[in-house]
Amino acid sequence: MARSIFILGIVFVFVSCTKSNLKVQFENQECVHAYLINSLENRIDTIQIKNNVLLYSSDKLEEPTLFKLEIEGVNTIKNPFYLVLSEEETELKFNTLIVPKKNDLFQNYKINKPIFMKDPNANIALYDFLNKWVEFSELYKNEKDEEKHKKLLTHFINMSELIVIKNRGSFVAAIITDFLFTNKLIDKSISDRFLGFLDEEIMELESVKRIEEVAGYK
């Protein structure tokens, strides 16, 4: 069974710096702590939220990297907010955060939508994909007819392919491909086709090479 790069690691305490790689504003919400998981280094940073603003800085983001964001009292690592961060600042806000039901892992993506003000790493495209995945999953779960299952899956894969092609110059395209392959929604031949769309500079990223290695593409 293929493994994903989305894994946990050792906990570290975050110390703020002047340069920010991530800024998150919380409207109408009192939040105290958040946890940011670096998928490449398998590390967790614990971040204190001050005046409803989360600031994260790192001098080690030499290339776009996938993170999971857990906000204490709102979501858990089982339904995180995914974020691609890099040397350039990503800025977003949440208007109102609602605690999802424990038995509904999709609900976090339906009710707590991040609004991006600065998005140098195509996170908007990632959330477009996640929203389509939630919609597909719910329709697929409630549909019993096998032929309709096939049509739903084909439609979802086609929409995902368009997102990958449109964002071929972003690491997000590789993340989407990895997600689909790891969750057995596409086979290796389709994943190879998707990866073939990516710009050469994206394929040379260490994060993409790690995906290929861990997922077993090569």
Image (spheres, rainbow, N blue to C red):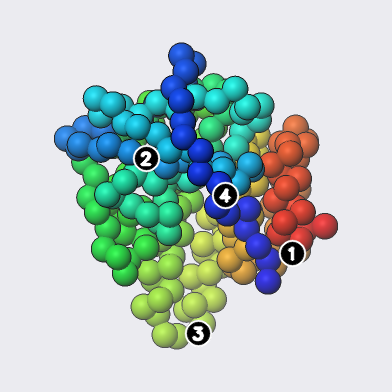
Residue at mark 3: 146
Residue at mark 1: 188
Q: Residue at x 43, y 65 (%)?
A: 136
Calculate the distance from the C-alpha at mark 1 to the C-alpha at mark 4: 28 Å
The kind of residue tagged 3 is Glu
N-terminal-most mark, 3 or 1? 3
Q: Position of residue 117 (x, y in %)?
A: 38, 26
Calculate the distance from the C-alpha at mark 2 to the C-alpha at mark 1: 36 Å
The kind of residue tagged 4 is Gly
Do callouts 3 and 1 mark residues in contact (Cβ within 8 Å)? no
Front: mark 3 or 1: 1
Do callouts 4 and 2 mark residues in contact (Cβ within 8 Å)? no
Q: Residues within 10 Å of mark 4 (few under 14, many from 20)?
A: few
Q: Position of residue 86 (x, y in %)?
A: 57, 28
Q: In this orientation, does residue 166 appear? A: no
Q: Nearer the viewer, residue 105 or 180?
A: 105
Calculate the distance from the C-alpha at mark 4 to the C-alpha at mark 3: 40 Å
At mark 4, the secondary structure is: loop
Residue at mark 2: 34
N-terminal-most mark, 4 or 2? 4
Residue 9 - label: 4
N-terminal-most mark, 1 or 4? 4
Calculate the distance from the C-alpha at mark 2 to the C-alpha at mark 3: 42 Å
